[in-house]
Amino acid sequence: HDEWGIGYAATHISSDLRQDLKELKITFNEYEHAVEAFYNIQLTPAWHWTINAQVIRPPLKSRGTAFVISSRVRIDF
């Protein structure tokens, strides 16, 4: 009963907001992009362990791409 998945998300930053923020010396890209992959392992019917990896390209031009690996445990009772 293991599960896995891959997802993609994008956020559009409006040109009006980017122009307003440019006056504050904050520069934004037009989009934020994120890709995620996960694998959910069913240890028992009530215990699940999920491993997750994400690559995130933030909208702020002053920030680099982030790579995040995480895990979580879910217990149903």
Image: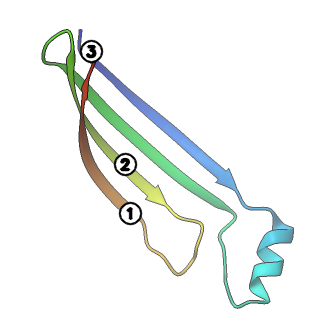
- Callout in the foreground (3, 1): 3
**Residue at numbered disc 2:** 54
Discs 3/2, front: 3
Residue 29 in percent (x, y) is at 65, 69
Residue with the mark numbered 3: 77
Percent of width and height locating residue 41: 19, 22
Q: Relative to residue 23, is residue 60 depicted above or below? A: above
Q: How many neighbours does mark 1 have within 10 angstroms: few (below 14), some (14-19), or many (20 or more)?
A: few
What amino acid is found at the position of numbered circle 3 in the picture? Phe
Identify the residue shown where x is 60% and y is 66%.
59
Give the secondary structure at mark 3: loop
The reply, left or right, for residue 15 in relation to residue 57 is right
Taking depth in this image into account, of 49 and 7 the one nearest to the observer is 49
Residue type at mark 2 is: Gln
Q: Position of residue 47 (x, y in %)?
A: 19, 20
Which amino acid is tagged 1? Ala
Residues at discs 3 and 2 in contact (Cβ within 8 Å): no
Distance from disc 3 to disc 2, alpha carbons, whole Å, reads 29 Å
Determine the residue located farthest toward the left in the rendered image.
43
**Which residue: 69% across, 91% down?**
25
**Mark 3 or mark 1, earlier in chain:** 1
Instruction: Check whether the beta carbons of the residues at disc 1 and disc 2 lie within 8 A of each other.
Output: yes
- Name the residue located 26 percent from the left edge and 50 percent from the top edge: 69
Q: Which residue is mark 1?
A: 66
Q: Quadrant of the N terminus?
A: top left
